[in-house]
Image: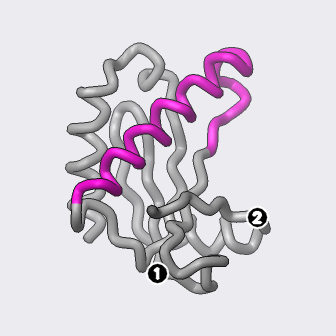
Amino acid sequence: MVKLESLKKSNQFKKTLREKKIHSECFSIFAAKNFYKPQKRSNLLISFVMKKKIGNAVKRNRIKRKLKAIVHKLLKKKGAINKDNTYIVFGKSKAYEEKQSALLHEMTKCFKKIK
């Protein structure tokens, strides 16, 4: 089973934010080749980030949970997400109102573009 491992240090975030970018209405995905190794080889390096301007903590956490659930679904599909990359997913306020099925379709397209 693939586990999600978060980025910890600011230099890891800065390095990832300089590479590939894909923007959509509900989220933005930033990707870079793995520049450091995850704790376990099967782990996926991905962080979910929200701006403080978006709603309150409840709304931000719900958006993060939605996006994490979608990434878990995509990991079950073979080849949907490249595990050799490090990802940062910025959630936007529109993701709160969108249905999970619509977000899943949109995120699948975005991860295909990154490849």
Q: Which mark is residue 8?
A: 2
At 40% across and 73% down in the image, what residue appears? 83
Looking at numbered disc 1 in the image, what kind of residue is underneath it? Lys
Looking at numbered disc 2 in the image, what kind of residue is underneath it? Lys
At 29% across and 57% down in the image, what residue appears? 111
SS majority, magenta = helix
Q: Secondary structure at mark 1?
A: strand
Within 10 Å of disc 2 (Cα), the crowding (few <14, some 14-19, many 20+) is: few
Q: Give the magenta part as a residue range.
A: 49-77
The Cα–Cα distance between marks 2 and 1, rounded to whole angstroms, is 16 Å
At 66% across and 65% down in the image, what residue appears? 13
| Disc 1: which residue | 33
Q: Say whether residue 79 is left or right of residue 100.
A: left
- Decide whether residue 51 is among the magenta residues: yes
Q: Say whether residue 85 is left or right of residue 49.
A: left
Q: Nearer the viewer, residue 53 or 98?
A: 98
